[in-house]
């Protein structure tokens, strides 16, 4: 009986991108599980049972980082930063990004240490996967490997039919009801480049801007201060992390989704917004064109006037073209968790033949 170990420890934060990857990929891997295979999931404390009773669970702990009984045929690390590694099993390492190489707050020595640690994992792996062609190209450029890198993108799990009819009654939600708004979803971090969106509110005085996501980085305070200086603080909403139902409501009711990010391994919020048929305005950097394709509108630069013009022209084009919504939904449907899981099952089976 082939045995498969899946590191889904990042379930500890289900509102994070990696938490959602672990949840939805895990669910689909179990649903498509091949007869005769035994699955074991490494999960965070309290998450045992999340994938049903047909699989085995092991709870993550600091001791587990040093020793896990290694009697598995295949071991899948769902992200490159995992601290849980096998000694004998055939390792599949999924790489989401090498964003640490572009972080100005990391010293060159820190970057070198992180690169060296990742290189050891790459050397150890029997198979490498990346979530975008862009990430695969960075791996080939920055790391030494003669292994093929299989690109298996993330899937989209949001379903417009699950959208609640009303927003939960929170301190900030009443103000969303009385005017149209633009939306960003993601961590509030310099690499997301969201400060470039603030001047556009001057060009769209009837709109609010909602930046939904973890806002613990000092950059978030910089955004608030910038909004005060521009005189648009009353039209900027930063609610922090939002739960899934609130996120669905925001996608469903926004006028447009804005994502001027500088660095992405994939860009899942873009695909989620497209699932709702919403016009998406994104940068041409890193992996984002792989997600948006021909259906997205692109910021050619981050000059305020140019960005405002792109948004204005894109909205007019979108409103004049009734086929745009359906084309966006079809594009988003290309990123499917059933397809992702199927590709991984083919990979698992190939490693035990």
Image: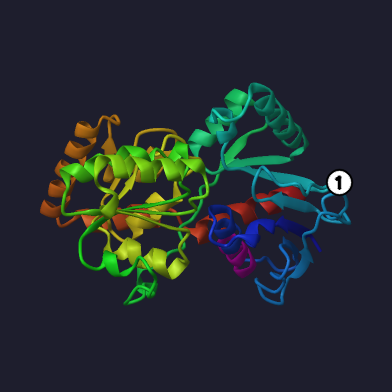
Q: Main secondary structure of the magenta part?
A: helix
**Magenta-highlighted residues:** 24-31
Q: From the viewer's side, name the closer residue of 37 and 160.
A: 160
**Residue at horizontal 61 percent and vertical 25 percent from the top:** 142
**Residue, far left:** 320
Quadrant of the frame with the N terminus: bottom right
Quadrant hosting residue 345: bottom right
* Residue 335 location (% of width, % of height): 44, 54
Left or right: where 138 falls relative to 203: right
* Residue 220 location (% of width, % of height): 44, 45
Query: Within the magenta stretch, is there residue 41?
Result: no
Q: Is residue 146 visible?
A: no
* Residue 344 location (% of width, % of height): 62, 53
Residue beneath label 1, please?
88
Left or right: where 116 falls relative to 154: right
Left or right: where 310 falls relative to 134: left
**Residue at horizontal 14 percent and vertical 47 percent from the top:** 317
Quadrant hosting residue 294: top left
């Amino acid at each position: 009986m082939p045995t498969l170990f899946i590191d889904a420890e990042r379930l500890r934060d289900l509102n994070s991108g990696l938490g959602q990857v672990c949840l939805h990929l895990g669910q689909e891997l179990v649903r498509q599980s091949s007869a005769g295979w035994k699955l074991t999931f490494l999960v965070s404390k309290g998450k045992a049972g999340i994938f049903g009773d047909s699989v085995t669970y092991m709870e993550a702990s600091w001791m587990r980082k040093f020793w896990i009984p290694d009697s598995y045929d295949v071991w899948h690390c769902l992200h490159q930063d995992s601290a849980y590694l096998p000694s004998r099993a055939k390792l599949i390492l999924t790489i989401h990004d090498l964003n640490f190489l572009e972080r100005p707050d990391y010293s060159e020595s820190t970057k070198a240490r992180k690169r060296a640690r990742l290189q050891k994992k790459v050397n150890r792996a029997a198979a490498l996967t990346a979530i975008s062609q862009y990430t695969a190209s960075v791996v080939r450029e920055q790391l030494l490997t003669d292994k093929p890198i299989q690109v298996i993108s993330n899937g989209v799990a949001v379903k417009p039919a699950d959208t609640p009819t009303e927003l939960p009654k929170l301190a900030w939600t009443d103000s969303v009801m009385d005017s149209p708004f633009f939306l960003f979803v993601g961590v509030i971090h310099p690499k997301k480049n969201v400060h470039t969106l603030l001047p556009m509110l001057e060009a769209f005085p009837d709109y609010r801007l909602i930046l939904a996501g973890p806002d613990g980085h000092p950059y978030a305070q910089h955004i608030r201060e910038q909004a005060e200086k521009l005189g648009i603080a009353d039209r900027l909403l930063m609610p922090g992390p939002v739960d899934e139902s609130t996120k669905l409501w925001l996608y469903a009711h926004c006028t447009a989704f804005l994502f001027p990010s500088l660095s992405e391994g994939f860009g899942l919020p873009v695909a989620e917004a497209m699932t709702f048929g919403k016009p998406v305005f994104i940068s041409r950097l890193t992996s984002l064109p792989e997600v948006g394709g021909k259906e997205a509108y692109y910021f050619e630069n981050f000059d305020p006037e140019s960005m405002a013009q792109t948004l204005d022209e894109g909205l007019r084009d979108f409103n004049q073209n009734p086929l745009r919504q359906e084309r966006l939904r079809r594009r988003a449907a290309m990123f499917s968790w059933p397809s992702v899981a199927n590709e991984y099952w083919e990979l698992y089976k190939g490693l035990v033949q």
